[in-house]
Image (cartoon, rainbow, N blue to C red):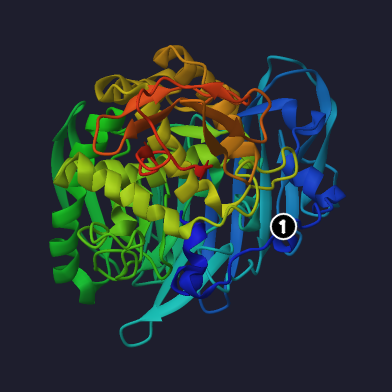
Amino acid sequence: MLRATLCFLAVLALPHLGAAQLMQPKPAFTRADSLRGSLTPPRSCYDVKYYHLDVKLDVAKRYISGSNLFRFQATQDFTRLQFDLFANLKVDRVVYRGQELPFTREFNAVFVTFPQPIKQGTRDEFRVYYSGNPTVAQHAPWDGGFVFAEHGKGQPWVATACQGIGASIWWPTKDHQSDEPDSMLISVTVPKGLKDISNGRLRKTTKLKGGATRFDWFVSNPINNYDVALNVANYEHFDDTYQGEKGKLTLDYWVLPENLAKARKQFGANVKPMLKSFEHWFGPYPFYEDGYKLVETPHLGMEHQSAVAYGNKYQNGYLGKDRSATGWGDKWDFIVIHESGHEWFGNNITAKDIADMWIHESFTSYSESLFTESLFGKQAGQEYVHGQRRNIQNDAPIIGTYGVNREGSGDMYDKGANLLNMVRTIINNDEQWRQILRGLGQQFYHQTVTAEQVIGYINQQSGRNLTKVFEQYLRHSGLPTLEVRFENNQTLARWVADVPGFDMPVRVRLKGGEYRFVQPTTRFEPIDLPGATKDNFEVDTFNHYIGVLVD
């Protein structure tokens, strides 16, 4: 999801951020933050293998009730574990082997005590029954919860969106990104005349007494719990197939009846070119078994795995705007491309901690440039990613605070994309770069990962140690500055950066000539560029997102 664009329409009106604005006090974290974001023993003691979420939606009362089955394997001996559910929802009971278990609540955490120790390696299960009026999102998808809307002549239209705030805002779960179930059954009962569209494949539709209908959706791949979605309306359906790298991929589209013709045109123009591009750059679509879906929603969009939420009103750009201001971003539908890109980065490869959300957003924002390149050539893609810089604030580190469910700066999108394009420039071999991107999806297929793992893989496959480059751009808000002096017929250069020993390669040239790489350090040293003067010296700031000071 592109949270950084919440204030997109106002970005150009913002004043330049001065030093006083950038030096904000560090946030104070609470016990509730630690319970939500940390892998404490009551959480790490069990590994979730399977969920069966079974809920009933009362649209008129904005009320949900139901249960979630936890099947798990014990990673150590324990008698007490934690799951998560927002405090405004009631835990009716917790049932284990036919008996109710005692539990306590602290903020949004629920602690369950078992009657005897669960031994390491044991596979077991318990079920949580719950009910209540879930949080209603005021401005989804930027805040989390349920969206209750209407379309047509007062027809109900309901959806969920909960990235960041967490899935426990509407269903009981182990709400930490490091633990994904291997598979999941999602059962949703809705009032007469409505359909629920959730993740995975529809296994069964059951008509119930009183006219309600239960929809059973099965997800056969690991899934982030914030990706689990409920979408309810009197949807119309059409479908297609795509012959991809792993065979025939089913394409299913669920849209409001009044938008069927527009959806056929817009999805037809965007989806297959997107799949062709991303399979080329990133490898096979990661969820052939569950298919690919687009579901029209009353919020802008979200990367719900195998059921991508779409609310861009069937227009190109981001709500009709080109975020890059280059002209390239209004030639395709931003939400289809960006949110689908998350199937590879975010859904296939998932950050263990939300502090590393850049793994999701930087690569996915960069995918917009690669998609543009696939359609219009490399120069167009480079112009697009360069244009993304207009949205960068350089206000705080991209990596957030670990263990407290706190992501970093919104610069993880556009600055992160520019960082990855710089890495491509430094590697200076486009096919090698493509194989690195594809290799990430293969190496970490359906896994949760850390920043160190991703950076380490890029280092290994590129044959370069780029750790300091990533550290500067991810862990510090400021840009490195290349300082250049001309003394005694020599060109001297150094980096001024936050990271000790920063030594990023950079392309330089004589005006009008060919670029060559030099690798300054943090001390003034001569660089090899014969004939350079203050008037003819140029740095490739088009591909390197840096500061330059020539004296």
129 vs 434, left or right, is right
Please indicate, yes or no, whether residue 401 appears anywhere in the rendered image. Answer: yes
User: Quick one: SS at disc 1?
Assistant: loop
Q: Residue furthest bottom?
A: 153
Instruction: State the residue position of label 1.
Output: 86
Residue 465, above or below 399: above
380 vs 404, left or right, is left
Q: Picture coordinates of residue 287 (x, y %)?
A: 33, 34
**Looking at the image, which residue is at 20% across and 59% down?**
331
Q: Picture coordinates of residue 2 (x, y %)?
A: 46, 56
Q: Name the quadrant containing residue 264.
A: bottom left
356 vs 458, left or right, is right
Q: Name the quadrant containing residue 498.
A: top right
Q: Picture coordinates of residue 127 (x, y %)?
A: 66, 42
**Looking at the image, which residue is at 26% across and 37% down?**
278
Please indicate, yes or no, whether residue 110 appears anywhere in the rendered image. Answer: no
Front-most of 410 and 274? Answer: 410
452 vs 540, left or right, is right
